[in-house]
Image: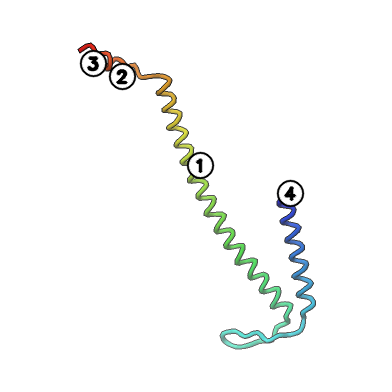
Amino acid sequence: MKTQWSLLLAILFAVVIAVFAVMNVEPVEVDYFFGTAQWPLILVILGSVLAGVVIMGAVGTRRIMALKRELKKVRKERDELEVRNNLAAKDAAEPDERKNLYNSAESTN
């Protein structure tokens, strides 16, 4: 359900941006570091939105990758702790006979 709402909001946002861009088609002057140029405002708006989407997508992807690495590390630690816990439970359930023989030999001396 969350994915459907996200998709619906993304489509609504795209429609609003498209309508806003189509309403603004007059040429505007764009200043660059090396000069100026005349561009239709629709291209400036759509280019800015596209640049924002690309930047936020890159940031989001980087964050997702970092979280996946952290999750992998935590799962590995969890598995190691489960193994230790299982070994400790096994040792507690089945005491080592050699330890008992050693303890009984000490008590007789």
Q: CA distance from mark 3 to mark 2?
A: 11 Å
* Disc 1 secondary structure class: helix
Q: Are marks 3 and 2 in contact (CB under 8 Å)?
A: no
Q: Which residue is mark 2?
A: 99
Q: Relative to residue 59, is residue 108 depicted above or below? A: above
Q: Are marks 3 and 4 in contact (CB under 8 Å)?
A: no
Q: Residue at x 41, y 19 (%)?
A: 94
- How many other residues sit within 10 Å of disc 4, few (<14), some (14-19) or many (≥20)? few
Instruction: Specify the label residue 75 is tagged with.
Output: 1
Colouring style? rainbow
Name of the residue lying farthest toward the bottom: 35
Q: Position of residue 95 (x, y in %)?
A: 38, 19
Marks 4 and 1: which is nearer the front?
4
Q: Residue at x 74, y 70 (%)?
A: 17
Amino acid type shown at disc 4: Met
Marks 3 and 2: which is nearer the front?
3
Q: Are marks 1 and 2 in contact (CB under 8 Å)?
A: no
* Disc 4 secondary structure class: loop
Q: Residue at x 42, y 32 (%)?
A: 84
* Disc 3 secondary structure class: helix
Marks 1 and 3: which is nearer the front?
3
Q: Position of residue 13 (x, y in %)?
A: 74, 65
Q: Which residue is mark 4?
A: 1
Q: CA distance from mark 3 to mark 4?
A: 68 Å
The mark nearer the N terminus, 4 or 2, is 4
The mark nearer the N terminus, 3 or 4, is 4
Amino acid type shown at disc 3: Glu
Q: Which residue is mark 3?
A: 106
Q: Position of residue 8 (x, y in %)?
A: 76, 58
Name of the residue lying farthest toward the left: 109
The mark nearer the N terminus, 4 or 1, is 4
Q: Quadrant of residue 6?
A: bottom right
